[in-house]
Amino acid sequence: MMSAPTSMTQKRKRILKMFKNLCMNKKQKTDEKLLKIAEEKYLKQKREKNKKRKKKFKEKRKKFKKDGWKNKKKGGDLTPASPSIFNINFNGNIEEMVAIHKK
């Protein structure tokens, strides 16, 4: 599938490219009807791509609601700065905590 165009000129270029391909296939001169077909074909591709993207996003959201964060902690809090690991009575003073860790 093609990536979505960001500007109107890119969109027109894509439609014209499809239009040329249709003309080559039909071996006809350029025609307003074929241009409309090309535009519809382009919009259909875009809709399908969006549907796939939305479906993928919904599945991810559903999985996240079921599992939560993958890297969530299991068990107790074991961060390096946690006073519980060192059995230190910590009353909330940061300078005191730094001094205790430096010992």
Image (cartoon, helix red, strand yellow):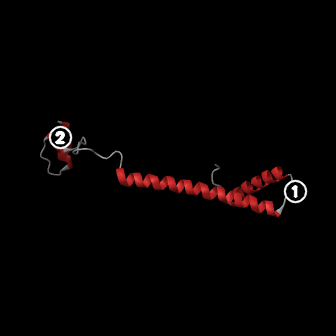
Q: Earlier in the sequence, mark 2 or mark 1?
A: 1
Measured Cα–Cα span from mark 2 to mark 1? 80 Å
Q: Which residue is mark 2?
A: 85
Please, which residue is most extreme toward the front here? Answer: 26
Q: Residue at x 52, y 57 (%)?
A: 54
Residue 16 circle label: none
Q: Is residue 56 left or right of residue 100?
A: right
Q: Residue 4: x and y, percent?
A: 63, 54
Is residue 68 something one can see in this rendering?
no
Secondary structure at numbered mark 1 = loop
Identify the image quadrant of the C terminus. top left
Estimate the x, y position of residue 45 in percent, counting from the top left.
65, 55
Write down the quadrant of residue 12 in the picture. bottom right
Q: Residue at the location (31% across, 47% down)?
A: 72
- In this rendering, which labeled residue sits more in front, label 2 or label 1? 1
User: Which residue has dot 1 on it?
Assistant: 29
